[in-house]
Image (cartoon, rainbow, N blue to C red):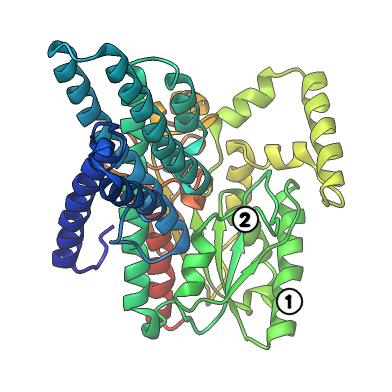
Amino acid sequence: MMFFCDREKLEMSRIARAVQYVCCGVLLFAASNSYALCQGIGMIALLLGAYIVINIAPVFVLPRTKQLRACARGNALLMEFLISTALSVVFFIQNLFRSPDLKELLVNTLFAVLLEAIVFWNGIVRVYLRSRQLGIKIRVIGLVCGLIPVAQLVALGLIIRTVSKEIAYENRRVLLDESRKDMQICATKYPVLMVHGVFFRDFRYLNYWGRIPGALQDNGARIFYGNHQSAAAVAQSGQEISDRILQIIQETGCEKVNIIAHSKGGLDCRSALTNPEIAKHVATLTTINTPHRGCEFADYLLDKIPKDEQDAVAGAYNAALRRLGDPNPDFMAAVTNLTASFCKVFNERVTDAQGVYYQSIGTKLNKASGGRFPLNFTYYLAHYFDGANDGLVGEASFAWGERYRLLTVNGKRGISHGDMIDLNRENIAEFDVREFYVQLVADLKKRGF
């Protein structure tokens, strides 16, 4: 997925930042060197003033958003810390072999460690608090390796590289959206209804679709959510979605909606469209990683796991989700409706509604390690029964409707079931999930929907 940006300006800003990192690193080294500070009051004022300014504003070429600017400043401090520390180490070794006053050298070293530690913690706290791509894993690596010599440099390099990529990636997104703001490419004729999959709910502050709705709205889309239960039979969920469609029609006055449904949500919507009174209010149905032909491994698990254990898990789940707002969750009905045996009967019985444009998208992981837990585990199970898969659903199960696309990326990673709803809010180098949905909805607009 390519971004449109001024590449020449981007390269110039990289050079400007690099020059500033080096200059600030040298100034930090000088300010943390007690020998330099012995050159008089004027030098002390100059260097300590530079030290304070650098800690407040370590870089002047900044990205567009407040969050990215905080990351950029923190990351700049870490890089400048590395330059200053490297110069201090070289200076220490050089003076050690010159046999100076050891007491004086020790005082200088302690002074340098103190001032450079301030720079380091100033930077690391900023990126830990504001970066969205470091994740728990890299943060833990940084904390653990921070206590181990040499390993701490490797961890710091990982942190700097991750945050640098985040800043560049996100800033390109901001520039792209700014460049086409007036075009409103996602302002479709009919609003978009986003329907979640199984075992999730449409929470207000924990969006099932991650950063996707925000990207769509920035480009003109009107977004609504299914607000149905997290786990229920396909027929029950279909009825809830039907009620939601009628509610949207009544509240907005729009004639129809465009539905984008993920995972089991695609089956739920197909069920809803069997009612002609609902189908006439739906322009399009786009299913994302939906198991239209079910999952063979679901049949296997239901056959092998003892009924008592199934009932125990179902009872615990249903009790928990009632507390979270589901009026009548049904774990076992939801799981059973994901089996290949159920979907075979379902597909024979349920036909596509006339006048509704159906399309589907599927993805696959190239290796199990491309998915996060538990998808890296279930990948093997799905692969044994269903072949190539996204960590849950086999490739053969995705296709439905007039148009079908299978997505993946080069290398070991691939695109998982969770990646398609931005579950982990992770930036994937070769696949911008937000831009994918922007282009998906933009295509619906071009088609007159």
Q: Residue 192 sits in which quadrant?
A: bottom right
Nearer the observer, 42 or 353? 42
Q: Please name the residue shown 36% across and 54% down the image.
A: 53
Q: Is residue 82 left or right of residue 352?
A: left
Q: Residue furthest bottom?
A: 253
Q: Position of residue 15 (x, y in %)?
A: 15, 55
- Residue 125 location, x and y as percent? 49, 41
Is the residue 185 above or below the residue 311 in the image? below
Residue 388 appears in the figure: no
Q: Position of residue 277 (x, y in %)?
A: 70, 77
Q: Circle 1: is it few (<14), some (14-19), or many (20+) Cα within 10 Å?
A: some
360 vs 103, nearest the viewer = 103
Q: Residue furthest front?
A: 40
Three-letter code, disc 2: Asn
State the residue in front, 270 or 25. Answer: 25
Camera sees residue 198: yes
- On the rendered structure, is 434 left or right of 29? right
Point out the tag, 2 or 1, that comes first from the N-terminus. 2
Q: CA distance from mark 2 to mark 1?
A: 23 Å
Q: Which residue is mark 1?
A: 246
Please name the residue shown 37% across and 84% down the image.
183
Q: Residues within 10 Å of mark 2 (few under 14, many from 20)?
A: some
- In this view, 179 is above or below 401: below
Q: Is residue 14 above or below residue 187?
A: above
Q: Is residue 232 left or right of residue 424?
A: right
Q: Residue at x 27, y 30 (%)?
A: 85
Q: Which residue is mark 2?
A: 207
The image position of residue 267, as x and y in percent, is: 61, 53
